[in-house]
Image (spheres, helix red, strand yellow):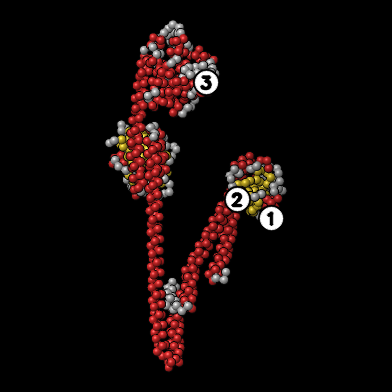
Amino acid sequence: MNSLKVKILGLTAVILALTVGVTLWVNLETQRTILHRFADQSGRVLGETIRNSIITHMAAGQQDEVASDLGRISREPSIDTIRIFDETGRILVSSKVEETGDLVSGEDLLAYRSNNFSYISMAGARELHSTLVPIRNQPACHGCHDAKAPVLGILSVHLSLDEMTALQGKGKQATFLSSLGMMAIMILALGIFILFYVDRPLRRLTEAMRMVEDGEFEAAHLSETNSREMAFLSGKFNLMVNRLRELIDRTVSQEREVAVAQEKLAHHEEIRSMNATLEERLREIEHLNITLEERIEEIEEANYKIADLASELEERNTTLQVAVNRLQALHRMGLDINATMDLERLFTLLVHQTTETLRARIGYILLLEQDSWSLTIGAAEGIPDHIDRGLRIPIKPGGVSQWVIHNRQPLLIEDIEEAREFSRVSRLGFSRETVVCAPLNCGDEIIGTMTIANRKDGQAFNREDLELLATIAAQASVAIRNARLYEEQEKTYLSTVQALVSAVEASDAYTRGHSERVKRYALRLAEFLNLPAETQKRIEQAAILHDIGKIGICESLLHKTEKLDQNDIHTLRQHPTIGVRILEPIRFLEPIRDIILQHHERFDGKGYPHGIVGGDMMLEAKILAVADTYDAMTTDRPYRKALSHEVAVAEIREHAGTQFDPQIAQAFLAMMARDDRSDEAAAS
């Protein structure tokens, strides 16, 4: 605490704190005075306005309008209450109807009687500004009021100062924070000034004095030039050191001469030899000191170079780590997209992982429609929710994707402000800042673009980001091409198998169109149950192919009109198993094989071919069983005529819990009832 710089800084901090405190107090008091004066002026203007309105209504004989006006005015948030009371304190009219006839508060009455028509009062924790405006008895009022009464009433307006107080509080906080910031800046600046212009020169001066004490006159030289005073002090100190050195050298020389004179007779030659040797040793020591200082400087310079190399190596390691991370992300993305054959999921996965890898806020894939020369959204992340995902975007100049499609190459826009040929606002409802975009190619054909915009850290995209996106787009193009081929292959397989089913059904007039109707009923029930799209797709495929196993059943048995014997029944019950064997080589139909196998199983376990209990049945098989049974009952068969809709519905209701899952059966009945009501409404 005895340090000069600490004392200077402490004294300065105390003076600044006192100055800032006084300034803060004066500012706060000034704000409060302005607040009260503003409230007083507003209250007076408002009171005069209301009084004039009251006098106008009373002169027109519209006394009832006075209370209505007070009620409307009191709805303003800044007005607490408005009332009119007489000189005895009795409330004549009030914005609060329940107060009429009560006595006014003592503060209002006392203020009026003391001619204090404007004052501040507290209502709990709230601060109110009250204004009193006497309503004088004018000649126009003598028809209804005693002409001797000088005052007909006193208008009392209470203004709430809550909002102004809140504003004052914010002003206090801002003034306090700015004062603290100013004081901190001044203390910091003064501290830096003292450390640089006072403390450092004093420390160097102290070190030089220590060197003088140790006899190191050469090293004790000062060269302070950061201020005129310090330069003057350095010059005087150096002059003092030089003179001191001269005096010491002179003294040593004189003492040496005396010693030589005393020993001259006896040891003249020996002393001379010793002096010469001593001087030589001193010169060697001085030379060694100079050499040592040079070596120390070389070591320090080498340390600086080592530090620079270490910093450069660390920077390169960081760059290498970023590159490794990007390659790992690219590898993981390649594995993920190559394992996905669903185009919608593939687009969503590409956009999400690319956006995360490039640390961006927005990413989307736009697909090119060659016929209409427009773009549709394949997948998007980060765009506003109100944008329609089915939007068709015409290809026009000014768009990033338009440029990429036209030029067939990736595009980097580091700053949209510098790229005047592109519009700042995207048609997807966001403002572009920095953008990278790459084409998606399928062979020589461009099928769309992938765009990433606006990095999360606010930095601009660079060439490395563009190269990474181009690489991802190339991988994505291959994955999209594979997914489309896989989708076409699926459609081809499904069409082939469906053609086989149609061929089987075409041979029998009774079952023609059965699979299509079962598909329609099953899909309606799945939609009624709000099942996921993947589940609905499995139900659709299983419904189309559920009777494909009948290819392996003798046609005469399928068309037999006589009663079936046990062998016939056993043979017919093999068609689910035969159907599974037929579909077994088709890999993409693997998820529906168990559905086809179970569509004749029963909830009570008495179905075929394996007698599975309802709890072990697949949900899709339960839905298919109800749809299949309903269509079988409502169409003609070789052994009977078609049943009516009502009879079929009654049969399903009766066998719910035995043949059918009760929940699925109830949902089917509810769906049919809803459709019946819709048909009746349409008919009426």
Q: Quadrant of residue 501?
A: top left
Which amino acid, mark 2? Leu
- According to the image, label 3 marks what residue? 613
Residue 19 vs residue 147, the one in the foreground = 19
164 relative to 267 in the view: left or right: right
The Cα atoms of the two marked residues, 2 and 3, are separated by 76 Å
Query: Element at badge 2?
Result: loop
Q: Nearer the viewer, mark 2 or mark 3?
A: 3
Residue at point 54% right, 68% down? Answer: 6
* Of pointers 2 and 1, the one earlier in the residue sequence: 1
Q: In this picture, is 628 found above or below 441?
A: above
Which amino acid, mark 3? Val
Q: In this picture, is 589 found above or below 125?
A: above
- For the N terminus, the quadrant is bottom right
Residue at point 36% right, 18% down? Answer: 500
Return the x and y of residue 288 as percentages of the image width and height. Answer: 39, 75
Return the x and y of residue 27 as percentages of the image width and height. Answer: 56, 60
Return the x and y of residue 207 as percentages of the image width and height. Answer: 48, 74
Residue 386 vs residue 565, the one in the foreground = 565
Q: Nearer the viewer, mark 2 or mark 1?
A: 2
Query: Element at badge 1?
Result: loop
Residue at point 41% right, 75% down? Answer: 289
Residue 674 in view (yes/no) = no
- According to the image, label 1 marks what residue? 114
Residue 389 vs residue 600, the one in the foreground = 600
Return the x and y of residue 504 as percentages of the image width and height. Answer: 37, 15
The Cα atoms of the two marked residues, 1 and 3, are separated by 96 Å
Residue occupying the far top of the picture: 562
- According to the image, label 2 marks what residue? 161
Residue at point 55% right, 65% down? Answer: 13
